[in-house]
Image: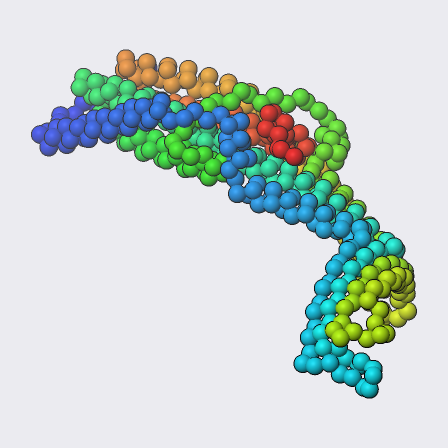
Amino acid sequence: MSVPLSEKTPQKNDTGDGAMMTKKKLLSYLILISLTLFWSLSAFAETEAQLISLEEAYRSAIFRSETIAIARENLIQSEDEVKRTRSFLFPNLKADLDYLRRPRALRSGPFLLRSESQTSFDLTLSQPLYSGGRAEATYRNAKLGQKGERLRLDLTQEDLLFEIAQAYYTALKNKNNVLIEEKEVERLSAHRRSAEKQLEVGEVTKTALLRAEAELSNAQANLIRANNAVMEAKDQLALLARIKGSYTLKNPASISFLEHSESALIEHSHKNRLELKEKKIQIDQALEGIDFAKGSFLPTLSLDLQYRWLKQDPSSSFLISNDRLAILKFEMPLFEGGIHTAEMAQARSRLRKSQLEKKRQQDEIASRVRRAKRDLNSLTSELKHLEAQVRFAREAFSLASRQFEVGLGTNIEVLDANTALLDAERKHSNTIYDREIAILQLKKETGMFRPLEAGLKRKE
């Protein structure tokens, strides 16, 4: 193979060029030593840090996340609301004790008009007999609200754990990119040494060595950026999962997902998505709201049983010290200015709105399922081609390097082969982890993402 004249013609180096070359060599050695020391310290720190798996990150978030704690408090409030509305169905017992004192008693002849002091005690039992169905509708609506808050808690956990999974695989992807950049630095360091030897024997010009130095410096800068990306990803994961202290990531097993037809996935999502179950509860609550509004047009019936004890000083001969009575109260709305009619119209509108929202949610979920399946299929196909691309790129770089070392190849051929290999390795690595995230995304869209079922169930 012929070599271009520009790289074969030896040039005489003067003293200034030699000094400059020595300084650049020294700078490159210092950078390489610094990076090596940094990698060694990082490796030592990782051996001392805790090893975190994806399941442990899930568990940490469940017990430490404020977002989940807020959702739990909402569930507790809904449980108390059920107790509050249930109390309207039971009788109410009330006791009143009063003491009254005046400056003096008031008489009219032999008759006592007003006593000087008076003590009274009332014991009242109130029982609603019929409320037009409003009390029962309120209680049923509160129970539906409790069920909805439980679903929202599960949905909050699912969304947070999915974000954690995304952050976890992103951190792993960035960590693997660091390994790729380290190999890039090793390859270019070896190529720089080879170019230096070729320059000494006059096989290449100084330009080839300078180009190798520039490529090596760029690779070292990329390595620094890759390490920073890992730290940023781990910080984001620690924030989401509430991981304390330094830690390193454990590579999880590859995620499995059985192939299903698109229609089967959409049908499964419509049955299992928590958002649709929540919409169903909202429709049921709207129906209860209609029942409550209907009760406004109906009469109410209640019963009060009362015992009264009265003591006066001085006492009157007409005083009844002990009294028992029963009050049966019937109320019928005759004219309310149209407020109950408006409330009924609002309740029916809320029902229509909830039904429309559920239909829209179903269509959006079906669209997201189709998109997630397409993304997964695309990444799976890409991965097969990228594996072949990496294999061919490695062979091409190995061949170009050997030819350059024996003077049969050019510097440009080596650098082009290295660039192709680096690009292939990056795409291959990113696609591997992007595919794992795509599987999780498809599971989430179809309602199959249930990390809590793997030994992390919420306490009821």
Above or below, 140 relative to 209 = below
Q: Is residue 417 visible?
A: yes
- Residue at 18% of width from left, 22% of height from top? 10
Name the residue nearer the viewer: 29 or 251.
251
- Residue at 39% of width from left, 33% of height from top? 245
Name the residue nearer the viewer: 55 or 198.
55
- Name, please, the residue furthest toward the left: 15
Q: Quadrant of residue 99?
A: bottom right
- Residue at 37% of width from left, 35% of height from top? 228
Q: In this image, 22 relative to 417: left or right?
A: left
Q: Check the image and tell me how it is coloured.
A: rainbow
Above or below, 77 relative to 316 = above
Q: Quadrant of residue 184?
A: top left
Q: Position of residue 154 (x, y in %)?
A: 64, 37
- Residue at 22% of width from left, 18% of height from top? 198
Q: Quadrant of residue 327?
A: bottom right
Task: Assign the C terminus to one quadrant of the image.
Answer: top right
Above or below, 201 relative to 157 = above
Q: In this image, 182 relative to 208: left or right?
A: right
Q: Position of residue 79 (x, y in %)?
A: 68, 45
Task: Assign the N terminus to one quadrant of the image.
Answer: top left
